[in-house]
Amino acid sequence: MGLHCCPSGATWSCHCKQVCCTTACVGMLMDCRFILKGYGCFRCLPHMLVSTARASLPLPGTSTHADACQVDSALASDKALELDAALGSQAVQFREIQGLETEKFLSYFKPCIIPIEGVFSSGPGELNCETYQISLFTCKGDHVVHIKEVPFSRSSLNHNDVFILDTASKIFLFSGCNSSIQERAKALEVVQYIKENKHNGKCEVATIEDGKFVGDPDVGEFWGLFGGYAPIPRDIPPSLQKQPDIPNAKLFWIATQGKLCQTVCNMLNKEMLESNKCYMLDCDNEIFVWMGRNTSITERKTSISAAEDFLKSQGRSTRSHLTSLTEGSETAIFRSYFDVWPQLAEPRLYEEGRGKVAAMFKQQGYDVKELPEEDCDSLIDCSGTLKVWRVNDDELFLVPVAEQTKLFSGDCYIVQYKYPGNGRDEYLFYAWLGRGAVMEDRVDAISRMNTIVDSMKGDSVVGQVIEEKEPIEFFLIFQTLIVFKGGLSTRYKRFIAEKGIADETYDEKKTALFRVQGTSPNNMQAIQVDQVSSSLNSSYCFILQTETSIFTWVGNLSSTRDHDLLDRMLDLINPTLQPISVREGSEPDVFWKALGGKAEHPREREIKAYVEDPHLFTCTFTDGDLKVKEIFNFTQDDLTTEDKLILDCNREIYVWCGCHSNVRSKKQALEIGLKFLEIDILVEGLSLETPIYVVTEGHEPTFFTRFFEWDSSKANMHGSSFERRLAILKGTAQKIEVPLRNSWKACSTENTPDSLRSRSVSSNGLRRSASSAFSVSGSNLKSSDNHQISSVSPIARSLFSGSYPDHDSADGSPVPPRPTAVVPSSPSENVGLDQIDGVKIDVNLLIFPYERLKVVADDPVTTGIDVTKREAYLSEEEFQQIFGMTKTAFYKLPKWRQNKLKRSVHLF
């Protein structure tokens, strides 16, 4: 039989040797196997989750449902393998058993899975609605809910769990006295689902608290359904058991006949896995089947069957999870059991696609030097004010405004950035630690930053960054930054004197080499590097300063944008000397002599490393011991006020502290972040120098909220997570007028009011404005009075020639407004591409078939479209077929998730 690839979120039900495609549902029949396909990253690496139903305990007055047969169970595994092969053999397959589902599996079903008794039937069913069947469910879990129907009896209740009693006219939520607030809040989501889908929203909801039954009529009604109140017996405390040690993983080679042969070794490494064989890794509670890329479907089926037989023989069928993965798609947990697993560079398939699009435009005669970089989505208002302090012994030295964009790598600095937020001023603090700074200065910088933050009213965002690891937001608030070698700190001077190290502190009379980098005049840096030939790089431009002359070196792979930044930086570093322009390959001897002789340097184009999707973790931190648990498919609702969470974005991490969490200070939160970097739970090679942010609930910056579908009204509610969820359920949520996150207007030369433009001026004479990164992503904004603000697509400006950079002239006078970008004329020209990023989609937009909109199309559409929004030109029907959702739902997703989905279908 053939397998058909269905939209993301679809499930396949295996029954009677057929595979039926159904929608992702909350209810699951007990006699079926489900294969859930969830897309991974843009490379189309899906996850396969094979869900195996089994019989539950018999309920009073009902018959026991038979277990789903072994034939169906084997069929589900076989079809999962065939589906994997049809999708490129790069999926990870998980076996799930009813009642023992993993949190990853449950996260695909919002808010929960409610098992339904019965047998799958393709025909219409008959419902008997004369009497309403009262049901009692137990709910367990803080971020995903395990639902189990239990007998409708008082004896089913206990003090540890949360229960839902569903009656014809009212839904009761009973909270055991030992249950957590987060569990109670999550159970309310299930109550809301039952109310809306089973009662059509027409029933009452009552909450019952364990131990409190005086003066509440709902309490009397609740216990009356059980025949009257009676004390719930105290649970017998479980015997203290020693925490099991980390399991000793055992590796088995699986022969063609399914025989297991254990590999005897002291330590596991990747070299032991051969591409033409299948292996089983026994980790006690989890079993992995690793299948080499050169193995056949038959060998893989045999290996999975062998692993299942092994679990049955060991009596572990119901307590050990089985995961099957193909070479190249190993999960972090699997890799963590190997002592040696090399970090491999990710394939950069999207770079090839970007190059094809650029070539396509050049063939049409457009002056396209390169496609715009992917939207960095920094989303920070760069019109704020900046203060910089340098740590010097036990004192803080306030750096003059004219010098605050010049940092020394031997020093440590505290940066305060004040910018307008949602009706209030927001503060962002950084502790910048120079790579050559002494440890005492580093400790002092962090300590003094925390002291300043604690002394201020409100909850500022705090960041710890180390030189060469700065996040994009750090560069954007400076706009122009020069980092010199050496230092001015007394401790630094004392240290190099004691060690006999030469003082490399920058001096205009000494030879110095600077690498120029950045993306725009509002984001450019000059970094002093070792003045040797090997420091050069063909992807960059450099400035070489000697006692008598100054050279500009242009790499062969640098862009016109880099050349513009080079000229600007030259005016800041040394505006007096006439520069000698040198292109790579035509350097004079005097140039090489200044660098100590000619030597080899990197000549290949630098490509930014692919960054995985963000991961959210809940954590507990006790006596320096950090334990974390991942929250899969996270949303804003997972940011519960009682928790402290870690958002791992690979390039930086965020420690989010709820208002009711037990984090005592920003210092402790930074310690949690450092501990997380040490354990590297995802085995992704996190550096201990990765930037760490500390974010407090209610003060989330936009560069944090971009990873969520953010609702500001939820972020500004009060009370516990249970009280907030109950207020939403009963329609009594606080009516708080909250300005939109992106309420401030994107500033450009032609639309910036004078009052905002004069708010802050940087030391180089350039005005502070909204970052160019924000302008790219904020083309559909609203002002504080809810009037729509329309602008020409910034992407179009960067694609075509004829636009001017956002800056003032050299003499300080404003430059003329830049002309509107030249966009190819077409019927879509008057539609307004700035509407595409919003929920409202113009129905008059020009429509093209998917096969012509793809990046690698044989007959591509080359004119009349915005190439960064190809998906917008699909018809509603074809959009639904390709993405599995409507356009409205798609554009409500975070930008990074939109881009990931577009990459997976070749529309990015």
Image: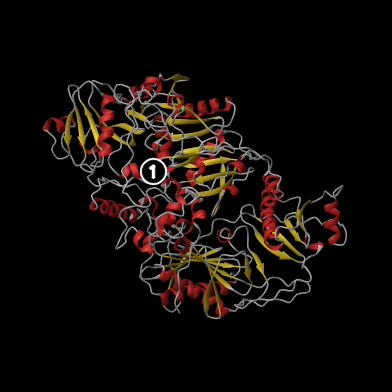
Horizontal side of 636 relative to 585 (left or right) equals right
The percent coordinates of residue 12 (x first, y second) are 53, 71
Which residue reaches farthest left? 589
Kindly identify which residue carries mark 1.
793
Question: Which quadrant, please, contains the C terminus?
Answer: bottom left
Horizontal side of 96 relative to 130 (left or right) equals left
Q: Is residue 241 above or below residue 29?
A: above
Name the residue nearer the viewer: 483 or 667.
483
Q: Is residue 324 above or below residue 246?
A: below
Name the residue nearer the viewer: 524 or 730.
730
> For the point 33% across and 36% down, which residue is it?
520
Horizontal side of 76 relative to 811 (left or right) equals right
The percent coordinates of residue 652 (x first, y second) are 45, 42
Name the residue nearer the viewer: 273 or 737.
737
Which element is circle 1 on?
Answer: loop
Q: Amino acid at mark 1?
A: Ser
Q: Is residue 730 above or below residue 314?
A: above
What number of labels is visible? 1
The percent coordinates of residue 297 (x first, y second) are 41, 75
Name the residue nearer the viewer: 133 or 884.
884
> For the point 20% across and 34% down, which residue is it?
553
Rendered image coloring scheme: secondary structure
> For the point 69% across and 76% down, which residue is it?
126
